[in-house]
Image: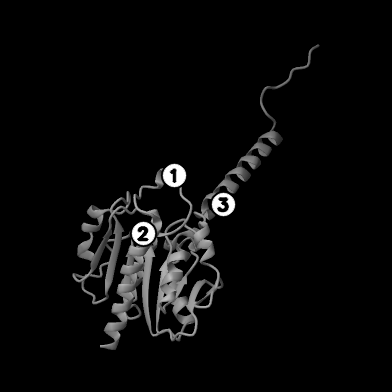
Amino acid sequence: MKRRFSSFPTKKTLWLILVVVFVIITIMGIQWATFARPPLPESLAALESDGLVMVSREPWLTFSPINREMKTGLIFYPGGRIDPRGYASILHEIALEGYLVVVPRMPINMAVFNPNIADDIMDDHPEIDHWVIAGHSVGGVMAAQYAVENQENIDGLILWASYPTESSDLSDTNIPVVSIYASLDSRVNEDNIGDRKHLLPAETRYIRIEGGDHHQFGAYEIDPEEHLAVISRGEQHEEILKATLALLSSVIDCVQE
């Protein structure tokens, strides 16, 4: 008599398959959640302290001018799924001008999951009298939200390739704001910035960088097809730096008046 073999897997085999699938999904989920676009060599080089700026990485990435009195600080929220170090080259340059610059690492690299981290940063630096908050992309969205909810603590807002949501209405405030965007940005453009001008103060400055794109606001790795800029990263950073420093300087001028 021939022995019959079932074509269906046993319960033990099914459980083993389910465990393997669960482990694979978990690993993929962790990789997705923790992924951040890594910094380019120029950003990594800017993480080194020199004779003018001291760079520290704990508890946050901080650029501190050396032997200069610091009264104004800049808190910068990174863009979504971007390693905070990817902005080091330009933020180091801002610190060279005498401003404390602090960049927090966000949970799963998304500022939306800790928009109030600025509170902790301010508490950790009581020597700073005036704070400006800035952010790139979704980081700028969260920076605007923080500015709305903490107007008594914020003396300026800088948006890099970003705009506020409808719930972040700053139009009736006297907070100085600059919105910096690029002409070849596929995400943040003239239309969606224009649609939200009613949410920002009438005196807001809008700086359009001709030939720039979304990702050249930092210096981090991107896929080749995402590179849309027709100007160099250095040229775009020069324009960003100029507009950012102008607002920081205006905050000091307002305070002195």
Q: Residues within 10 Å of mark 3 (few under 14, many from 20)?
A: few
The mark that comes first in sequence, 3 or 1, is: 3
Q: Nearer the viewer, mark 2 or mark 1?
A: 2
Left of 34 or right of it: where is 201?
Answer: left
Q: Could you say where residue 102 lies in the image, as x and y percent from the top left?
A: 46, 73
Residue contact at pointers 2 and 1, CB within 8 angstroms: no
How far is the residue under mark 2 from the one under mark 1? 19 Å
Is 179 drawn above or below residue 37 in the view shown?
below
How far is the residue under mark 3 from the one under mark 1? 25 Å
Q: Which residue is mark 3?
A: 30
Colour treatment of the image: one colour
The mark that comes first in sequence, 2 or 1, is: 1
Residue 224 disc label: 1
The residue at 30%/62% (across/down) is 180
Residue contact at pointers 2 and 3, CB within 8 angstroms: no
Is 73 drawn above or below residue 45 in the view shown?
below
- Quick check: can you spot residue 18? yes
Q: Could you say where residue 145 lies in the image, as x and y percent from the top left?
A: 34, 67
Q: Could you say where residue 101 lies in the image, as x and y percent from the top left?
A: 44, 74
Q: Residues within 10 Å of mark 2 (few under 14, many from 20)?
A: some
Q: In the figure, residue 14 lies in which quadrant?
A: top right
Q: Could you say where residue 38 lies in the image, as x and y percent from the top left?
A: 52, 55
Q: Which residue is mark 2?
A: 235
Mark 3 element type: helix
The mark that comes first in sequence, 2 or 3, is: 3
The residue at 40%/47% (across/down) is 227
